[in-house]
Amino acid sequence: MLTDDTQILSDADVRAAVRYWLDREEWQNMIGKYIRRNSPANLTNYGGQFPELLPDLIGDERVPAWEKLRREAVWALEHAGYNGYRASQEDQRRTEEEIRKQIREHVNRRIQELFEETPSLVHPSVVAASELPTNMARLSSFLNAWQKDVIAGYNHNKPLKDADQYLKTVEMFIGLMGDHSVGKITFETAAEFRELILQMPATHGKGATGSPKKELARARADKTLPRVTMKTAKRHFSGMNSLWKWLIFSKHVPASLQPFSGHAFPGTKSKRNARDDWSSEDLQRLFTSHEYRDAPDSSALHWLPLISLHSGMRLEEICRLRPTSDIISKDEVPCFDIAPREGWDPKSEAGTRIIPIHSWLIRHGFMDFVTQQRARSAEHLFSPELVLHKGSISSAFSREFSKLKIDLGVGSKTTFHSFRHSFRTVLESTDLKESHIDAVMGHEGGGSEGRTYTKRVSTAKLRQVVEAFEPPLDLAFLRLASTDAPPPSPKVMVKKRKLVPPVLDEKGKVVRCRKA
């Protein structure tokens, strides 16, 4: 019997715990109903999803399937005499996979009994994700479980707002391409789907339209009909990729099989890529302007462009910084700590990150400014100047900054977000690894493996990336006078009233005031 606070369980421990758990009456009834007494056709077509389906049928239907499976793993360990809450996360993960494995074995044994051969649907032994056998379950059989999980926010992701739109995309794929087995969908299958999308009429999916095949036939018969745009086709592939990421996460397909990734959609570059970097001339216009030079040294206008330029941070990310908890020292390096908190999350999973503070900012007095804000008990870095309004702290500043740069003659494609582009452009001209740059920028990088890797980049390496940045304009001419002055107060919006003359009688007395 293990007695350590953190238990280290062998594979045999985990297997025995799951067998003992699945021997319980509740689980034996489930296995009997859905596996032993199910039809051969259902087992062949849908058996591949049983490892996810069966745990999902237990307990509160509002709880997502992945969370139910996690709970089953914890309870299985506790039921076997191991303290599930004290077992390591790795032990719990292995127990989850063992539950899936033993359910697959029940399915395989039953199919073997019926057909007197081992099916290609699932293999009795569970191997690494990259070696998973071909899953012959139909695509449609996974839709309910996928929708439930993405709406709930599986794997600690945010709940997906476009789940219904993505479902329509998958239904269109099935309508055009057929209800394929997920293990048989290839890159070529997806490429054919892309070509068929681009032949569809632009009105498909808008209002009462026919089936995908009928709509495709209608468009082929009438060459004058407007077709689906490349941008819409790309959006449909986003929907298919959402489903595919879930299939990989749920171990239904191997991570090496990603048929909807790597396709080209010409002319659909995001607005982020369409923005210009800040040129040295435009930086000169901004930092030498009367508006900038007259701004208090503790103001948002003074610091926000400098911080974004030297860190690549997004505007809202900077405005959300709390001086007491988000400016930290890690490995003796001053850093920005961008992490989720109540009421706000970074833009993506990769957006949660540590960014060392550029030495130029420190020399310019940034840490002194932080100290002053801490002493004032400021909630956010630029409190009380910037206030939360409709879920955003940066919106008012963004509008004012946009007006300023237009007045200075800066082009329309150069925005505040362009500071972030300037930061990345300079770094990409160095010999730094792209994955290290992604780790600082909060970009997703290349696939799930790349994202996992960037989380392990050392503080020293992150600091090397940040310090490699040099702005296109030498900013040595900027000098701080003092940060002792309190930050500017928020602007008070006063509604202007139109002044109108009063109505007088013949003797000059006021009869009444006209209404504006």
Image (cartoon, grey):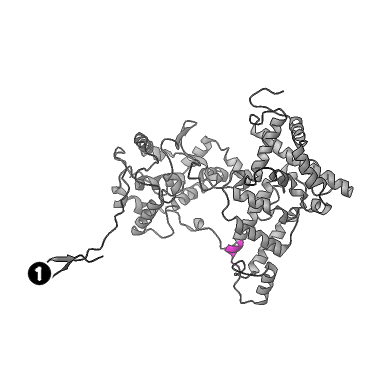
| On-image quarter of the N terminus | top right
Residue, disc 1 = 507
Q: Position of residue 134 (x, y in %)?
A: 77, 50
Reply above or below: 515 against 480: below
368 left or right, relative to 496:
right
Which residue is the extreme one toward the right?
A: 116
- Which picture quadrant has residue 178? bottom right
Question: Is residue 123 in view?
Answer: no
Who's the residue at 50% across and 31% down the image?
331
Reply above or below: 168 against 447: below
Numbered range of the magenta stretch: 228-233
**Predominant secondary structure, magenta span:** helix
Q: Position of residue 428 (x, y in %)?
A: 52, 48
Q: Which amino acid, mark 1?
A: Lys
- Which picture quadrant has residue 56? top right
Q: How many marks?
A: 1
388 left or right, relative to 459:
left
Question: Does residue 55 show up magenta in the picture?
Answer: no
Reply above or below: 84 against 300: above
| On-image quarter of the C terminus | bottom left
Taking depth in this image into account, of 421 and 509 the one nearest to the observer is 509
Question: Is residue 267 in view?
Answer: yes
Q: Where is residue 335 in the image (x, y as percent from the top left)?
A: 46, 37
Q: Where is residue 323 in the image (x, y as percent from the top left)?
A: 41, 37
- Which picture quadrant has residue 324? top left
Q: What element carries label 1?
A: loop
Question: Does residue 230 show up magenta in the picture?
Answer: yes
Who's the residue at 43% across and 41% down the image?
321
Who's the residue at 51% across and 35% down the image?
460
Taking depth in this image into account, of 32 and 336 the one nearest to the observer is 32
